[in-house]
Structure formats: C-alpha cells, structure tokens
Amino acid sequence: MVDLRRTLLPVLLLSSGVQPFSSSRATSPLGSTRSSPSVSGRVTATSDVPPPAVEGRSKSATAAMPRPKKFLNDPADAVDEYVAGLLLQYPNHLRKLAGHNVVLHGSFGDEEHPNLGRVSILSGGGSGHEPAHAGYIGENMLSGAILGGIFASPAVAAILSAIRAVTLPTARGGKGCLLIVKNYTGDRLNFGMARELAAAEGYGVSMVVVADDCALPRTKGITGARGVAGTVLVHKAAGGKAGEDGAGLADVTAAAEAVSDGVSTMGVALSAVTVPGAEEANDRLDGPDMEVGLGIHGEAGARQCPLASCDGIAGEMLDAIQSYGRIGPDGESVVPLYGKGDELLVLVNNLG
C-alpha cells in the first residue's frame, strides 16, 4: 500500500510563460471566479477574465490598438471544434456524451460498466487551459471531463449528465464518483449543485476542491487561494488510487485530499491573456516588466517587477512557495511546505 503522504508530498509547481490556452486548503466556500444567478434561479458562471485596463486611454489610442492574432475559425465554435478534434485523434480512446461538451473514456461504451469495478473520477471547468481537462482522460487518470466555454464554468446539467454516465447508483453496485474541482466560485457552485442532485438520485459522489495558488495571501478577500496547475497531480494521485484493488470512494477521496493539501503553485508571466474574440489585445503587460503570481485567466498577481534572470525568477518562486507553507496538523497554524532533506515532486509548466 502506498502512503501518499510520505511519497508524494510536498509538491511544488512553477508556472511561467505567456498566457494562452477543493481542497481543505480553501479558506472560503467561494472561489475566484465571478458568478451570477440566471433567470431560472440556477447559478451560471460568467467569464473569469478581468476587463482590459482602458482607463485614461484616449479614443485615438484605443483605435490604434492591434487586433489579437489567434489561429481560430469562429471563436464561438472553438470548444466544439476542440472536442471534435480530440474525437478524431483518439477514436478508440474517447467518446462524447450526446448533447453536452462532455468527453468520456471509451470504456464507458463497453457492455460491463466500469463503475462496477472502480471509482470514477471527473474533473472540468472552463476551456482555454488545454490540455486540461480532456487531455487527462485515461487509465488511472480521469474517467471523463466536463468542458465549459472559454474561461466559463460548465453548466449544472452537463456535470450531472457526466456523473450519470460514469457512475451507477449505489443500489446497483456502483462504486461512486469523485469530482475534482478548482477553487473558482462558478465551478464550486455548479459542481456542488450537481453533486447534491446526483446524491438525491442515489449516486455516491464526493468532491475535492483544489486551491494550490500561493500568489496571494490566504486572507485576501473572501475567495481564498485559486486552483491552478497542481490539480493535474491530484488527478494522477486519485486515479492511481482508484486503480488499486478494493479501493472505495473514501480511499480515492482521501488520496486526492492528501495531495491537494501538500501542493503549492506560483506563476510568473511576461504578457497578459487576450480572450478569443476580443476586439483588441490586452496590453496590461506590454512594457518591460513581468508579473509575479498572475492568475490563469489573467487575474492580477502579487506584483509587477522588472524582468529578472532565470535563476532569479526560480529563486523567488521557490522562496514564495516555501514561505507560503501549508496548514499544520492542528488545522490552524501555517508550517513551511518543505524543509532541508525533504524529497519533492516538481512540475514546471507553461502558465495558462
């Protein structure tokens, strides 16, 4: 039996580059995305992208801004075309749930339902962070992924349909489903609502919210830490546990929580995000500075500063992660994430 707390923790993630594409650590029931009630009373997520800073810019300066350049057909079709491309590329590995942008592992078309033998794992969120989340579907990884619009949470109906597709009711021998969610308000609300509806229908469902971004203070507003790249390692740990003989929903959930509690991420960026379809490029970081702690949707980071060397940037990121620490065993105190002699798992990725 693998002791995840001894072998996988702590984890550091260093995210850098140009913007493209829950957890017990979360300090609030709300995350970092904005949400608004729809006319039917259900919660729908609005875009995570902060509006471009245009205050103080003259009309002539605005008109002179260059249009963004992206390899797209129609931005409104980007998510649909991405899903279609995945299915063409992996016809024997992936399948799409009819009526929704939900991608499932191909085994869910088999005669014997996979949930009879192992816990299913779902994740998802706004598109624009590829290969998340559909790129992580596979054996001992995700059973499926729910894709929202670009930087927008998926709808409750899509999440609930995905749960039904990969899970059997407990009364019929289903082993349950784990939802792995990043700490943004729209995601937490919509996945949480779908979980409650599924539970009322007799499905066993648990949820872990990942909040690994250490760019901002824990006490910042009501949002708590954002969920970012560390979510990928939570997928892997939970999927590995689900592949063990006899692992139940509680075991898989505990594995995901163990890694979520011990992972921290810090990002730096040289430019800001421009959403597909925007009329002008986001020039917030067009100058010589870089930004430390920029969010994956372009949310403001900790600070902007002069561009540093690679060694200087790496040192600052590691210092920030180490000092941010993690919540201690008492549930209140903050202890360093790692110390001298500790073994670490490090992921370096592009930010976005």
Image (cartoon, rainbow, N blue to C red):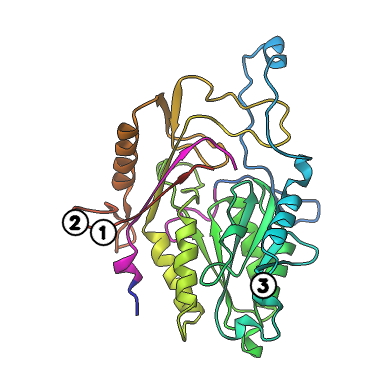
Q: Amino acid at mark 1?
A: Glu
Relative to residue 59, is residue 224 depicted above or below?
Answer: below
- For mark 1, give the secondary structure: loop
In the rendered view, does 306 fall on the left or right side of 194? left
- What label does residue 341 carry, if any? 2
Corner quadrant of residue 279: top right
- The amino acid sitting under disc 3 is Gly
Residue 198 shows up from this direction: no
Q: Position of residue 189 (x, y in %)?
A: 63, 57
Mark 2 secondary-structure assignment: loop
Q: Earlier in the sequence, mark 3 or mark 2?
A: 3
Above or below, comparing residue 142 to residue 321 in the picture: below
Labelled pair 1, 3 in contact (Cβ < 8 Å): no
Disc 3 crowd rating (10 Å Cα; few below 14, some 14-19, many 20+) is some
Q: Which residue is mark 1?
A: 343
The mark found on residue 106 in the picture is: 3
Looking at the rendering, the stretch of residues picked out in magenta corresponds to: 4-31
Where is residue 13? Give x, y as percent: 40, 49
Task: Tell me if residue 265 comes above or below residue 123 in the rendering.
Answer: above
In the rendered view, tell whether residue 286 sits above or below residue 164: above
**Front-most of 214 and 42?**
214
Residue 94 inside the magenta-drawn segment: no
In space, the residues marked 1 and 3 are separated at their CA atoms by: 36 Å
Marked residue nearer the N-terminal end (1 or 3):
3
